[in-house]
């Protein structure tokens, strides 16, 4: 049976150590082979897309991004960029508007198909927030060459942690966004929580009517960039029941881990959940992903040790257990999956304190 392809992809949108350019390029073939459609470059540690957004990329970095975009296009995938014009709406005047046009012209030079305007991880207790952000997005819509425009609200979930960290959400903020924002602009949504474990049909239906459009899922699994989550490796398969996603979402972007190779294990399973629907079995998908990517022997070890990686985490491991695991996986030094496990066991993946929501 031939299944239609879901609009799924990866957004490199996490805090902490970002991927290197070689790993980003390697992901094109992985995503293509596994029926993903897009990759979005939006690392939180690229200052020229965030707090230094008014400045141009240095020439060498601009060339790297352009090469990356060209590589994804050659592979037959869409390439996106995530722009976070940091708190531009607090003082949005003629100067900010001019700089915004300049930045969009720079991004046009790269050749991005998808442009994401990201207002997450910023202060939100601002008067007329929805109105100002809508104006900014509409200005960008006029200037961009991207054929798809997505916007991430400052409050992109019902999770109370957002108001705790970024201030009280203005009254009717999300409804006002849905009402004022052009219907051509899609809106990111992470679900009932910042890191949601499920997206029920009733929840997605409610959000659809509130935003007056189907939400575009920003899925924060298997991401592990926060103070708590950096102590874990999220390797198990996606457990979502995606059968209703076809009707109640416009797309599905997955935010991976700081570990690019290990992220491939859960990422390998998501397209299968779309294809198999109610027949999807997460454990079988996890087993298949491990064996397909890592080889039979290493896969067996990862499956045996999954409780250490995903349930107990670094702080739950005894010193002897951690050393035994290091010794075990060092034997597979030629495997990038094993090397990332060893690096994680050595505590080399430090969380970024700028990540405030986990």
Image (spheres, rainbow, N blue to C red):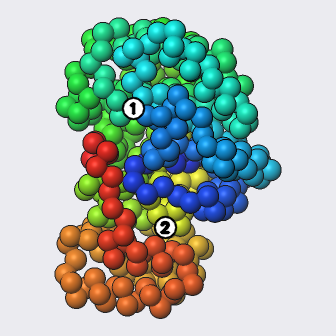
Instruction: Name the image quarter holding residue 131.
Output: top left
Q: Is residue 32 above or below residue 248?
A: below
**Residue lying farthest to the right in this orientation:** 74
Q: Residues within 10 Å of mark 1 (few under 14, many from 20)?
A: some
In the picture, measured across the screen, residue 57 lies left or right of residue 302, that is: right
Q: Which tag is nearer the camera, tag 1 or tag 2? A: 1
**Is residue 46 something that shows in the picture?**
yes
Position in image of residue 166 (x %, y %): 26, 29
In the picture, measured across the screen, residue 40 lies left or right of residue 14, that is: right
**Is residue 202 something that shows in the picture?**
no
Position in image of residue 199 (x %, y %): 39, 39
Position in image of residue 60 (x %, y %): 66, 49
Query: Which residue sits at x=30%, y=9%?
Result: 127
Q: Nearer the viewer, residue 281 or 197?
A: 197
Q: Is residue 97 above or below residue 322?
A: above
In the picture, measured across the screen, residue 335 lies left or right of residue 208, that is: right
Question: How many numbered marks does the figure carry?
Answer: 2
Query: Which residue sits at x=35%, y=34%?
Result: 121
Instruction: Name the image quarter holding residue 7.
Output: top right
Q: Is residue 297 above or below residue 67?
A: below
Q: Nearer the viewer, residue 219 or 206?
A: 219
Label 1: which residue? 120
Instruction: Name the image quarter holding residue 202.
Output: top left
Label 2: which residue? 262
Query: Which residue sits at x=51%, y=13%?
Result: 95
Q: Secondary structure at mark 1?
A: loop
Q: Which of marks 2 and 1 precedes in the sequence?
A: 1
Position in image of residue 338 (x %, y %): 48, 79
């Amino acid at each position: 049976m031939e299944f239609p392809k879901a609009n799924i992809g990866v957004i490199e949108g996490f805090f902490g150590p970002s991927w290197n350019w070689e790993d980003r390029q390697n992901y094109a073939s992985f995503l293509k082979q596994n029926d993903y459609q897009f990759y979005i470059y939006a690392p939180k540690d690229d200052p020229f897309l965030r707090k230094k957004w008014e400045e141009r990329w240095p020439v060498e970095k601009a060339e790297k991004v352009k090469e990356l975009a060209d590589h994804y296009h050659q592979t037959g995938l869409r390439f996106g960029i995530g722009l976070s014009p940091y708190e531009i709406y607090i003082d949005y005047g003629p100067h900010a508007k001019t700089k915004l046009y300049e930045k969009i012209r720079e991004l046009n030079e790269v050749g991005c198909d998808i442009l994401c305007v990201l207002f997450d991880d910023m202060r939100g207790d601002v008067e007329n927030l929805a109105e100002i952000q809508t104006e900014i997005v509409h200005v960008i819509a006029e200037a961009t060459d991207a054929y798809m425009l997505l916007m991430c609200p400052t409050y992109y979930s019902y999770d109370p942690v957002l108001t705790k960290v970024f201030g009280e959400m203005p009254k009717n903020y999300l409804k006002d966004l849905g009402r004022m924002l052009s219907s051509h602009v899609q809106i990111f949504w992470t679900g009932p929580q910042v890191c949601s474990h499920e997206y029920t049909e009733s929840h997605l239906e409610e959000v659809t009517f509130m935003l007056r459009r189907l939400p575009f899922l920003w899925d924060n699994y298997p991401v592990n960039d926060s103070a708590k989550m950096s102590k874990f490796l999220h390797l198990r398969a996606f457990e979502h029941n995606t059968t209703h996603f076809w009707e109640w979402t416009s797309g599905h972007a997955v935010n991976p881990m700081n570990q690019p190779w290990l992220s491939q294990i859960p990422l390998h399973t998501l397209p299968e959940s779309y294809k198999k629907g109610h027949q999807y079995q997460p454990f079988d998908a996890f087993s298949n992903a491990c064996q397909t990517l890592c080889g039979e022997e290493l896969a067996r070890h990862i499956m045996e040790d999954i409780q250490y990686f995903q349930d107990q985490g670094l702080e739950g491991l005894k010193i002897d257990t951690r050393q035994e695991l290091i010794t075990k996986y060092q034997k597979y030094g030629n495997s990038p999956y094993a090397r990332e496990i060893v690096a994680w066991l050595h505590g080399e993946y430090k969380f970024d304190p700028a990540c405030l929501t986990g």
